[in-house]
Every structure is written in C-alpha cells, then in structure tokens.
Image: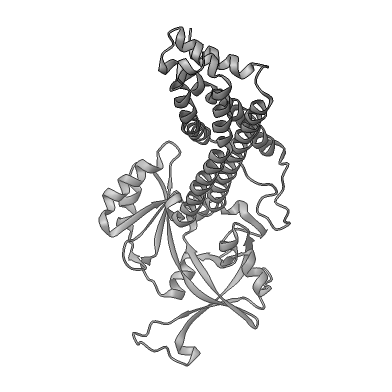
Amino acid sequence: MNVPLLIARRYFFSKKKRNIISIISNISMVGVAVGTMALIIVLSVFNGLEDLVRGLYGKSDPDLMISAMQGKSFPVDSAFIDRITAVPGVALVTQVIEDNALLQYHDRQMVVKMKGMSENYFAQSNIDSAIVEGDHRLVRDGQDYALLGAGVQHELSIALDNRLSPLRLLYPRNTGKKLLSMNPETAFNEQAILAGGVFLIEQRIDDSYIFVPLGFARDLLLYGNRRTSLEVRVGDEHSVDDVKDELRQLLGAKFQVLDSDEQHVSLLKAIKVEKMFVFITFAFILLIASLNIFFSLSMLVIDKKKDVAILRAMGATTQLVRNIFLFEGAIVAMVGAITGLVLGVSICWLQQTFHLVSMGMATAVVDSYPVKMQATDIVLTGLAIIVITVSVSIRPALNAARLDVRDNL
C-alpha cells in the first residue's frame, strides 16, 4: 500500500479542509484544465495548418524534384533520363523548364512564372483536379494551350480559347551583351498561345503561374536540351526517402534532390517555429496557473501541522511526509490536466467532424479551421504539466518535511 498516496487522496477529498484552501485548490484545477485545453487546441490547429499547406501544394508538387546545385539549368538527354528511371522506385520522370516571362493580353501585361512541362506531367500531378474552368490538356488537336492561375486570369481578364486575341509571351533575348536592346523586335523572343484552362491551387501559385507545353517553353526561352528541373513520381510500393537517397548517390554533389517538404522548407519551418513558441508561451501560462497549487499546498502544510507531527511521532520518515504533499499537488494538477485533455480532444474532434468554427471568409481555401490531433502533442503537454507540478510542489513539500515535531504536538 502506498501510504503517502493514500493520505494525499484523503486530504484531497476531505470535507474538513478550510474553505480558502478548497477554493484555491479548485482555482488551481480550473487554471490547469483551461491551460491544457487551450494548448491542445492551438497545437492541433497548427498541425491542421501544416497538413493544409502540404495538401495545397501536393496538387502541383512532385514526390521528388531534381535540380542543379549551381546555376539555373542543366543539360538533359535520353541517357540521363534512363539512368534516373533505372533507380528502383522511380515510376515517372517529367522534364520541366521554368522561368519568368512577360505575359500580354490585349493592352494589359504582367510578369508571370511560366512552367513548361512534358506530356506525362498529368500522370504525375493531381493538378487536373484543381481545374475550375476549361480543359487541363496542354495540347489538343496539335494546338498548344496554356493553363492559367485564377489570379492571373482575373488580373488580365483573360477569355479562354480566344483565337482572335491569343496570349503573347515575351522573354528577353540573350544577345551576349550587358545592355538590352531598346528595339522590342530584337530585344525579346515572342510566341502566342491560347488560354485553355484555369486552375485554383494556392494564392501564391494562382497569382503568378501559367503552365505551358515543354516544347513551347523550350522554343521561347531557347533552352535546347537544357532543363531547370526534373520531377519524379515515386511508386506506391516504395519509400520516398529511400528513393531520394538512391538518387542523391547516383547524381552526386552537382544535383540536389528535394522531397515535398524540402521544396517548401521555409514555409513549413515557419509553421513549426510558430508552433514551438506557442507551446513555450502556453507552458508559461500553465506555470502561472499552477502557482495556485504552490499557495494551496503551503496553506495545507500550515493547516496539517499537527497531522504531520503525529505522523513523525509514529515513525514517519522525512521522505514519506514530503511525498504526501508532492502527491497532493500531483493529484490537483492531474485532475485539472485530465479534464483539460478531455475537453481539448473533444473540441478538436467536434471541429474535425462537424466543422463548427468557420474561417469566416468567402475566399478561404477551406470552409472551417483545420485541426489535427497528434499523440506527441498530448505526450509533450503531459510532460510539461508533470515538470511544472513538481516545480511548484517541491518547496511546500520540503517545508512540511522540515516541521519540528515538538512544536506541534
């Protein structure tokens, strides 16, 4: 039988505690419960935002992207592609040319990110599910078409499949001179293309990107056999990390192989850093809320001086007395923490299931706040509460253990 825990439980459930001690204990439990609940909810929201970002970019991002470690482009031939496709797990390789270009439509113009893609791109990407208007195919009946971001279409008021006024894309001509010619006819390469469809993925992409056939981009930019990147789809039966390691060994230090998270490392890192600071902030809030445990235990020690003296006279050790009040603080904190965990998990489940809290914006990517619960967040919250409880309970427990028996008998 655990004597310190038994006595601590009797103190916790005792109705003979002085009213002020009970009030402070209850305030402590409520504070810990609210802090724990808020911490679980906020961490779950950050997890949901992280998954939302991955889901948004997943419509256009490849499993792996190969690019040059130095420079904008690198030469690609059939032998190079064959070496990559021979790696176990590589299901598809898409050639990409991406660069800035000037887009003109009627009397309007803007600088866009033009991404030229080989014909097998849509076998790799789910972007066809993001098409909100028109057709996703880049080549139809021998005619080249462009896919526009919704923001680009809105900015230039572009009509789809307008054969009388096609899109005009211009790219500076490389003359080998430092100064650009002032004559537009010699300063830019220019090609026309029809607008075939509109996609809606994510604001940064929608407001700046257009997708065109690889041959169109190659001829406009005069890239020849050079490519800015290769996009790799990994087979379902293989691990992305394993294939990434194999490709890095094959290609050497001249190339970088990035998975989906590494392609957006800055954004995901920012979310993780914010999540860490939120966790630290709420941990301090929990610490402040738990200070009431310190005061309630200190008052309980004063109230139970005679009980401690009797226990010491009966042979109770200093450690046993100390553990009684440590367990008392732990019980108060655990009741509050468990209550907070149950409430936090319940609220997150309700949000996931019934979408109770909406974003409140008609243009939002999702209708309701995304949440995702993770076991690691619950474990970290529990560890934080244990550390805080021990920190605020140790002093009153030591004071109780140092009480002089003779003064209280």
Q: Position of residue 220 (x, y in %)?
A: 46, 75
State the residue in front, 408 or 354.
408
Residue 125 sits above or below residue 325 on the image: below
Residue 233 versus residue 201 in the image, above or below: above
Residue 143 coordinates in the image, percent (x, y)? 57, 67
Residue 6 % position (x, y): 54, 12
The residue sitting at the front extreme is 407
- Drawn side of residue 333 relative to residue 217, left or right: right
Q: Position of residue 280 (x, y in %)?
A: 50, 45
Q: Answer left or right for 171 relative to 348.
A: left
The quadrant holding residue 18 is: top right
Residue 76: tell me if it is visible.
yes
Q: For residue 347, which quarter of the picture?
A: top right
Q: Is residue 9 above or below residue 164?
A: above
Image coloring type: one colour
> In the image, what residue occupies the spot 56% across and 19% down?
304
